[in-house]
Image: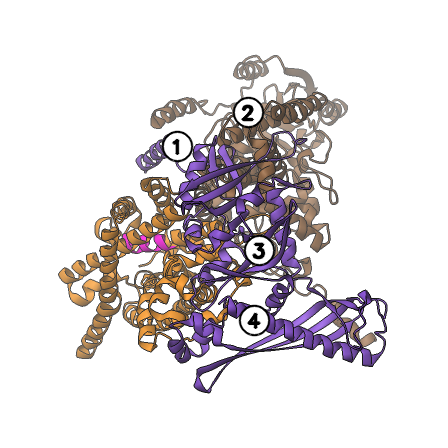
Amino acid sequence: MKRIYCLCAVIFILLFMTGCWDQDLLKNARLIFGEGFDLAPNGKLQSTFLIRDVPASEQQSPKNDIIFTVGNTTRETRDHADDQISRHLRGYKNRIILIGEEMAKQDIYPILDFFYRDPKSALNARIGVTKGKAADIFSLKKVGNVLIGEEIDELIKSKEETTTVPKVTVEKIYPIMMDPGEDFVLPYLVEKRGRVDVSSIAMFHNHQFTGVLTPDESIMYLLLKDQKGKVTRFTRKINIRNGHQNSNDFLTFNVDKSEQKMKVLIQSGNQITVKLDLKWKVNIIEYPKDRLNEKKMVTQLNQYLSKEMTDLAKDTLKKMQKARCDGLGIGRQLMAFHPRIWKTQKEGWDSNYQKVHFAPVIQVEITKKGIIN
Amino acid sequence: MIPEKSRISQGQFMFVVVQSQVGVGILSLPNKVQASAKGGGWISVLIAGLAIQVIILILWALCKQFPSDTIYSFLPKITGKYLGNLLSFAYISYFLLSAGTVLAKFADVVERWILQETPRWALLILSLLTCMYLAMENLRVIARLFVISSLTIIVMLVLTLMGYVNVNFSYIFPITEAGWGKIVKGATEALFPLVGYEIILVIYPFVEGKSGGKLKAASLGNMLITLFYAFEVFTCLIIFSPAVMSEVPEPLLYMLKGFSFQLIQRIDLIFLSVWVFVVSTAMVAWIYMATVGLGRFFHRGEHKKAVPYAMFILFILAMMAQEPSISDFFDRMLKIGHYTFVVGLPLILLCFTYLIRKRRT
Amino acid sequence: MRYLLRKIFSNKQTEERPHMKMNVFSSLDKNLEFIENQLFHSSDLKWRSIRFNHLEGLIVFFESITDQQRIQNEIIQPIEEKREGNVDKVITSLEITKKSDLCEVPHALIQGKCVLLFEGTVEVYVVDVTAVNKRSILEPENETVIRGAHDGFIEHLMTNLFLVRKRLMNPNLVVRYYQIGKATNTKLALLYMQDLANPDLVKEVDHRINSISMDTIFSPGFIAEFIEDNPYSLFPQILYTERPDRVVAHLMEGRVTILSDGDPSALILPVTFFSFYQSPDDYHRKWLVGSFIRLLRLMSFIIASIIPALYIAIIGFHPEILPENLIFSVKSSIDRVPFPPIVEALIMQITLEVLREAGVRLPSRVGQTIGIVGGLVIGESVVRAGLISYPMVIVIALTAISSFVAPSNEISLSTRLLGFPLMILSAMFGLIGIMFGLLFILIHLCKLESFGTAYFAPIMPLRMKDLKDTFIRFPIWSLNQRPHDPHPKRLNQERNSREWEQDDPGKE
């Protein structure tokens, strides 16, 4: 017994003498805050690394360091960046991944593979597509008083709440990306006079960037997908009666509640029809013309808005079909509930998808009008 | 025959069964089952659970014939001393091999997910020393710990529940996509992560109470675990699209990787840490099964003395299993061993004892 | 080696006084001379001559441990007044014995008795006139409570027994005396409830106390070390208390208490881990409040033992666990620290222990200085100098505070000591190391048994009914049964004490 204890002690001491193999001290790390990927002229990958440095004293504010490197793969560019920087470059707190437009038009999976494979990578990083080069947006360094990395991160986060862009992280798009029956969408970032604007959605098909939705269409898409955020606002021009051109004619409303029902129907001749029924409960936020106490007026508005929104939905879906982006997962539905149809449609789903008939119907019901009539 | 100190109650017996069944398999099970059964993977698990219920019935019927004997002491009674002892050794090596594979797989996962640089031997020593400390105790102490560490299963359940933030139920449809044949084939795949109920063979005489109650306890334990596994598989199936499932060997961990709370992120690390408890208890169960036999043959029934060198054997086995070819070989051996020692042999022995009984009367 | 040491010690122990019988001499001088020789002419041995029944007599006593007032009142005065008669009847003392063996006299003298010798008589009278010098009953400083009884044990065994008996007026309360320590002759009292305490337990305790063969016993800590089951364990297995109400509560759960003369601490056994986290305070508060505070205490046990290890694991192995807004503020603080986190933690932890120990030793007036030196100088300057990071200071401070929450000093020390191996493990293997460490501790707790009861009851083995008074404190009227862990003879302690609730409805 005693000998065993001795042996244990010896082993333990031996372990301790040599130990700490996996130690990866936080103080020896340089933390990447954001990464950008662009297409370099010769078909190579240009990566931008946004490194956040925090000074030791509390008075000074954190600083950004930007490194540009060119290489063949994500990991290689990161290694190149590590060569140019003191201490170790660590990506486990990466917040944002931006992909330049040109790069996104290629297959983006090879860029992301590294993130999926590395056990330490930050899978909850936000991901987006930029108009122009991602490097250009990072090069802004500061927007107003906020550092660029933080600005983009917070901006996308707030836009997710206003149902402008989908809530996506690197992890969330993984199952969708690998699934042949569904496509993902990403926030689309535009640089406008030294500021970053996030108000629209970049559509993808088969890991490739294929088009952009307008802000209204983006919101509509998210509602069709039943991914409503906290706030969902539309502003519409109202011309119910004679077409007086008047700025007073604009109405802003918020969708408080949205019920979505999607049905995939197979009609004769393998015609796929997708029925989308949406019921909205709407809160009027701004309507200078008032007169909302009249019941007739409200029903009229209801009808008008329903029609308007249905049209918008149709436009949105048309645009998506044109971009071949199956953002609603119609293929997935076929696969799950109509496996036989799927077998025939599987080959060339890209083009078959464009033939799918969408029949969206949106019913708008005004339930709240704020605290005045 | 059985000393007062190592008797356990039926409730404890249930938890012992539970803890020996939950092991390393849980992480990779969804991946393996999905590979053959597709969206019906969770059904496969349920079928496997049912199959195990039948096996438990066989084992129980066998043990019932010898209410105060472990497998090592009743084997010679059935087959004669020479053959019986030989079979006992076969069982011991099967148990040791199981423990070794559990250990090896545990080291593999930890090396892949957390400690990439740490040498395998250090990790093995750490886990073996801890297991040794427990395995040297009598069954009552082991059972006590098993009861408490079953709490970790609840923690794991809660952590998995978080996965339901973004699920897509259409991923499992059509449920019978692969066809029933494949689903049953998936069930055979699911059988192996669920092994561990063999512990009935060894600890049956230590349990207090009537045989009916013992069967009930073991069945309840098996049911709980089957449901737990089915739930985990189901969760993975609705979170990952079928294409991803084949890419991710440990889907349970992978789905937790991106989640974050306000205070902590990387829930997968928390899950893995909790999982350490579960694996250690499963390992102790296997070691206990083996050392009871070794103790009977070499140390006059004191299993304690057999533990140190059993540990050494396990260490060697787990170091050897580092090579994929050898670990595959072990896996195949285990499958054969499982069918022969846990399904086939007990069935034959059962028939044999009935025949003997009949002839006598 | 150990064997050799034991041999040396046992040699010393066998040098006992040869006990032989010797009759009292009829000559007074011879007797006195013998006694003086036996006590080596100790200077505090005094005698006074008297006359009674026309015989020359002597009163011999130690002036140091006898009450001279009592000798005056109870012996000399009656004798001087009566002048003759029966000695037994004249002396008004409570306890008089006659002895004919002179060898027993010195032994009686050192216990504070005085001896009456008469010329020509072959018997001596031994009268108990022990002086009692005791402090008043005060609240024990290390176990203060807000509500509840404020009396505590003192160094006098009789007073302590009085305090217990006063609260437990029950013929079933049994006191057994023992004399332990061949040289010091320390008096012990074993207390238990005849109708509750498990007879096996009492027998076992009795057996273990009787087997103590040390010659000096000067604190209950000695006894505890002699009788506890697992001397190598870090966890205390015997509960020390100076509160009579705590003793009574435990006696009524069927446990056994050992009191010793000359020390205010009572030993309660067998106890479980959770007894160390119960305080009499819990039962004076509303049950919800009491439960909350008890949960807080148990949580503090976890915090105190694993937080430093967790911090090391996170900073050294898995920084990705920290959320992004936290990681940058932590990083800014630790960037300048020259040591690896384990060294940092060890430095701080040891500094803290040194400070604590210094604080205990110093008188309270100087103690404040320690507060200033420790709190301000070390806390602030060490960070300023860049030796230790702010988060580490916070972590260690949190550890210290949490460990002080425990109502028992023993467990609080154990808790902090427990942190060290966990810290080392976490510095080697990160989270996995901590988990194996915790598993090891859990196995150890599950293995520990003291006097036949599981140490970690009622969790291991699990007993749902006892959980009512473990993590949280259920209302007292729902605690129908006593805790099961000391295996009391009677389990039920209460049944429907709120019966009046059902009596009422008729009135409405």
Using residue C387 as the reference point, say whether residue B328 is left or right of it: left
Mark 2 residue crowding within 10 angstroms, few (<14) / some (14–19) / many (20+) = few
Residue identified by numbered label 1: A16
Report in which chain the residue with disc 4 lies.
A
Residue at 25% of width from left, 45% of height from top?
Answer: B316
Q: Please state which of residues A88 and A200 is positioned toward the viewer in this rendering.
A: A200
Cα–Cα span, label 1 and label 2: 58 Å
Q: Colour of chain B?
A: orange
Q: Residue A137 or C103: which is nearer the viewer?
A: A137
Q: Are marks 3 and 4 in contact (CB under 8 Å)?
A: no
Determine the chain carrying the residue at label 1: A
What's under tag 2, amino acid-wise?
His
Question: In 3D space, how far apart are the residues under numbered discs 4 and 2 (Cα atoms)?
Answer: 108 Å
* In this rendering, the label closer to the viewer, 1 or 2: 1
Taking the spot 68% from the left edge, 25% from the top edge, the residue there is: C376
Q: Is residue A345 rendered magenta in the image?
A: no
Q: Are marks 2 and 3 in contact (CB under 8 Å)?
A: no
The residue under label 2 is C107
Is residue B285 magenta-colored? yes
In this rendered view, identify the residue nearer to me: C473 or A364. A364
* Residues beneath discs 1 and 4 located on the same chain: yes
**Mark 3 surroundings within 10 Å by alpha-carbon count, few (fewer than 14), some (14 through 19), many (20 or more):** many
Amino acid carrying label 3: it is Tyr
Q: Amino acid at mark 1?
A: Phe
At mark 2, the secondary structure is helix
Q: Secondary structure at mark 3?
A: strand
Where in the figure is residue C357, as x and y percent of width and height?
60, 26
Q: Residues within 10 Å of mark 4 (few under 14, many from 20)?
A: many
The residue stretch that appears in magenta: B282-292
Residue C269 is at least partly visible in this image: no
Q: Earlier in the sequence, mark 3 or mark 4?
A: 3
